[in-house]
Image (cartoon, grey):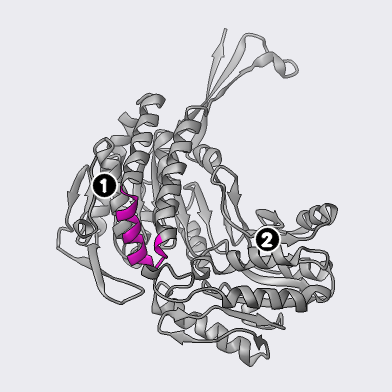
Amino acid sequence: MTTHSVEAFRQKNVLLGGEWQENEQGNRITLDSPSSGEDIGSVPALNEAEVDKAVEAARGAQKQWQKTPLHERKQLLLRWADKLEENKEAIGTVIMQEVAKKKSSAVDEVVRTADFIRHTAEEGVRINGELLTGDSYNGGPAGKTAQVSRVPLGVVLAIAPFNYPLNLSASKIAPALMTGNSVIFKPATQGSLSGIMMMETLEEAGLPKGLVNVTTGRGSEIGDVLVTHDGIDQISFTGGSGTGISMAEKAGMVPMVLELGGKDPAIVLEDADLDKAAKEITGGAFSYSGQRCTAIKRVLVKEEAADELVAKLKEKVEALSVGKPEDDADITPLINDKGADYLQGLIDDTIADGAEVTTENKRDGRLFSPVLFDHVSTESRIAWEEPFGPVLPVIRVKDEDEAVKIANDSEYGLQASVFTQDINTAHRIADELEVGSVQVNGKTSRGPDHFPFLGVKNSGMGVQGVRYSLLSYTREKVTVINQ
């Protein structure tokens, strides 16, 4: 068993063509801790020629890998999962330092990722084709049969976000490998160290040479090179809606799975269990300081329940600890100054619009105390824009129809929560909401990871979740037998 120290990964190279390499010009990107601002390491800044090298290696390796028996692919993934879990403390520590996620959540992410990989390996051997007979169609000949197989797409470009640098990377890489594809892995710049650590455990598990290639660098410099490269056969991206939409325009006919932004509402009716609603909403809104596409980002509550719900939310929000990820605080610094300044602008505008600040409104650099707003107007930016930070607006509504209208007027359509004790009402509202998933009496969240996960409108396209992801990395191929 190899146990990795944190320091061993401070200055990391990338995996290109089966070798760990430095950038040819020696250009590197220095990574700072969002919490302390200290230098925590660096990764190579690749150029276009190195991207070409990565894609060439991936294309060559994929031809052999697709011929590898499924049970051998499965065993590679199972070994990878074991290696990850063996190193959960070291990798979790780097996640904590890179993205300011509290230590317990960072370690949990490593374990969750290992679980995802194992489930993918088990489910992957069950992805089968079908056999169609000609005479099942009117006038079709009995001697004609169609063998429908599922085959890999080729080279997959996996672009991951900062907020779940392991889980949302492996959720692309594992199903791609299991279905016979090769991978170009572009980790988020802030998240590259832990992403590379994950790749090293995969190599230790027996990764064939050239099958996965790591391309670190700023999206502004190599993003378009990767997305428009004629050697890429599929793109899986998690990130902002603007970036995803632009990427889709540039990629042309290349199939894509996009997991983008959200403005997930929690609709609370007067008959809801308000204690449960307050607990779920607080967890859904403020976990990882609200830096999640599935975070609850607005509460739409009927006037009859609003005063009591806000009081319960206020109590729970004020109980959240604020501080450093090393101290396992609930609310930790945001990922960068740009995000922090954007959030501050939203807070300032919401106050100027007349909303009531019910909790402490305090900022120290990138660290914000969690803010709960009441009496928020639908004219405020915060009613529609994604804050990606620890702030939650409460919008009071007169009835469920108004709540549904406000929810659906959004450009996003990821998830929504409905809190009511009337299951018929829950179903009726769920049917009307223009989102990928509706949570009844629970917070918006991704998972369990074998559930389908999807968004509509500007929240994405395609479906993820173990089996759904496996299918997204394959296509049908038909062989017709004439007798």
Q: Is residue 246 above or below residue 306?
A: above
Asked if residue 365 shows in the view, the reply is yes
Q: Is residue 136 above or below residue 307?
A: above
* Along the viewing direction, whichever of 391 and 236 lies nearer the viewer: 391
Q: Is 370 placed above or below 42 here?
A: below
Instruction: Identify the secondary structure beneath mark 1.
Output: helix
Residue at image coords 64%, 58%: 415
Range of magenta residues:
87-103
Residue type (three-letter) at the residue carrying disc 2: Ala
Residue that badge 2 annotates: 416
Q: Is residue 263 magenta?
A: no
Mark 1 lies on residue: 200
C-alpha span from label 2 to label 1: 37 Å
Helix, strand or loop: magenta stretch: helix
- At which x and y percent is residue 125? 47, 27
Q: Residue 233, image x and y in percent?
A: 41, 43
Residue type pointed to by label 1: Glu
